Structures are given as C-alpha cells and as structure tokens.
Amino acid sequence: MSWNKQVKRWPGWMVLLLVVVGLLAVGATRDTGPRTPEERVEEISKRLACPVCDGESVFESRNNASQSIRTEIAQQVAAGTVSDDEIVTFIEQRFGGKVLLVPRATGIDALVWALPAAALVCSVVGLAFAFRRWKLAADTVPDDADRALVAAALQRGEADG
Amino acid sequence: MSEPGVTLDAPPDSTGRGRRRIAPFIVLAVTVVLVGLFWVLASSDSSKPDTAESFLLGRPAPRVVTTTLDGTPFDLSRRKGSWVVLNFFNSTCVPCKAEHPELVAFVDQQASLGLDGAEFYTVVNDDSDGAVRTWFDDNGGGWPILRDDDGTIAIGFGVAQVPETWIIDPDGIVQARYAGVTTAESLGTVLQRLRQARG
C-alpha cells in the first residue's frame, strides 16, 4: 500500500486529531508570565463591550461611559485585591450581560459554545455513517466473477429449458 | 422459451429505507428546536413596568461620596433615615430636559410631605458646571446637584445613559430604578407603594 493511502487510513486521522487537540490545549493553558497593571487594564477592557456603542470594546471606545469604565477598572486593578474575572463580573452585574464580549459558559449563553460543538460532533458522526453506507453500496456492485457466475447459470437454464 | 436479456438484480436500494429511518429524527430535532425557541420567547417578560431591572435592587446602594456643585460635601451613607431619590442628568441630554418639569413637580410634591418627603439629588457627569447651573436657574429645581467628575457614581450604579432615576430607602437599600424618562406621578406612586410595603 502506498504511503499516501496509508496516511489516509484511520491511524493518520487519529494522529491529526491528537496533534490538533494537543495544540489547542497548549494554546489555551500557556502561561504568558506576569502582567503589568496597564496590561491587566487593557486585557480586561478588551473583554467588555461599550454599553452605549455598537460593536466597540471598552478598550477601543472613546465614549464617556467607556472611559468611566476604564477608570473603574484601573482603580480596581490598582487596589490589587480582585481578579480579572471579578472585575469583569462587577461591570457585568451593573450593566448587564450585554457588556460581555466573550459570552459566559453558563445558562442560555452556554448555547454559543455548545451548539457549534454539537454540530461538529453530529457532522462527524453523520459523515462516518455516510462513508460506511457508500462503502457497503460499493461492495454490492457485481464484479466480473459475479457476472461470469450468472452467465454460466443462465446458459445452464437455457440448456435445460 | 427462455427470456432474453435477463438483467441482474440491482443492488438493494437502501436509500429509500434510510431516508425513512432518518426522517423521524430530523422532524424530532426541528420540533425540539421550535419548542425551545417558543419557550424562550414565552418566558421573556414582555410587559413594560415603570421600573427597570438591576443587580442592585434589594442590595445596599453603592458608595457615593462627593461634593455638590457649590462644594458642599455629600455622603449618601449619611442620608440613612430618609428616602433618597438620585437622578442622573446631563444638560445636553434632550430626554433629561423633557423630564425636568416632572422632577420639579415631584420634588414639590415631596416637600409638601414635610419630613416624610423623599430627598432629591441630581448627579451630573461629563458636563459643564455653567451649563448645568444655567439650566436649573432657567427651569427651576433648587435641590442639590452632585458632582460625578470621574464617573465613579455612574459606574457604581451601572448608569451608561441618562436620564436614570434611583430610589433608595432609609436603610440605604436600592428599591427602584427608572431607566429613561419618568413622571412625577410614576415616581410618587412607586414611592408610596414602597413606603407602604415598608410599613
């Protein structure tokens, strides 16, 4: 079997899947090192949407409300007693979930994460079933040996008939 | 006599049976999605109450320590014992200006109640002192105007757009929020209901 065909069999797909999952895990958990307060304020500001603008983050917006929120974030970061998530929660509680640029993974918002994953799983399973059905259909196509067998049976039938 | 041209049976056609097997699941999936959407829409509150929702309702009011435009110190925590109404205002805000006569009427109404009447304060942020004073001089309203120069008070209450009006009870607990224009009648009715509920 050629190397090309070997790679396209299931071990090759498993290796590809393991590499992708491994890279995703590394990317999601890597430690970028300690951050300055300014970097923390910037990162938190980029997680929040301007409450009165359309599509801008608190980091980008020059709206007065966004500037006030950045000031509040800077004060809480300077206090050094709360985490980034706690600061985001503080702002979210006061302005509502619409200020979250990254939806939470709880409640109805979890559908944003769950539906694409579910669609991916359903697609993979559907493809697996489809491939299997195509393979079975291919196996029922008669080959030359089958035709020769039938031709011989027909000849015997004609001779008897 | 034999029949010429006998053809091999075609492979069993599984696609028809396959479609019949899958169809019920597709119908079930679509039904589940439609029922889910219907449930989400039906459970949403489409009524339009006077007051708006807030995380702060039933919780202690945020810290408000500032000064009035005239420089007089103000601390909300020292106003416990009285009902307090905070109105967030900006002199460039058209709805705020439209609402102002209602607020003047409400304050007059509360003043007629004597010591039982609610205290009323306006909070201004990102505004010109001169413009605010001119507006109040021209349109009435002798109540204290509080500074919120750094937006801390607005952020504490979650006020992104004006006007907004907040009612705080004598224990310092937030009891009501109006997001948008309100009226003297609505404010008075809600305040009266809150007083009665408190006993």
Image: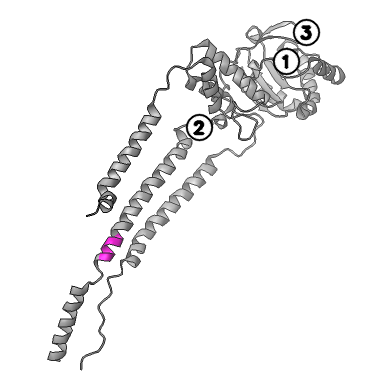
Inspect the magenta stretch and tell me whether residue A79 lies in it. no
Nearer to us of marks 1 and 3 is: 3
The answer to whether mark 3 and mark 2 are in CB contact below 8 A is no
Foreground disc of the pair 3, 2 = 2
Task: Return the x and y of residue A79 as percentages of the image width and height.
Answer: 53, 10
The span from disc 3 to disc 2 (Cα, nearest Å) is: 43 Å
Q: Determine the secondary structure under disc 3.
A: loop
Residue with the most extreme bottom position? B1
Q: How is the protein colored in the picture?
A: one colour
In the picture, the quarter occupied by the C terminus of chain A is: bottom left
| Type of amino acid at the residue the image marks with label 3 | Asp
Point 52% across, 24% down: residue: A43
Q: Are marks 2 and 1 on the same chain?
A: no
Q: Quadrant of residue A95?
A: top right
The residue to which callout 2 is attached is A102
Front residue of A59 and A86: A59
Q: Residues within 10 Å of mark 1 (few under 14, many from 20)?
A: many
Chain part drawn in magenta: A133-138
Disc 1 vs disc 3: Cβ atoms closer than 8 Å? no
* Amino acid found under the numbered disc labelled 1: Tyr
Q: Is residue A110 above or below residue A33?
A: below
Instruction: Say which residue label 3 marks.
Output: B70
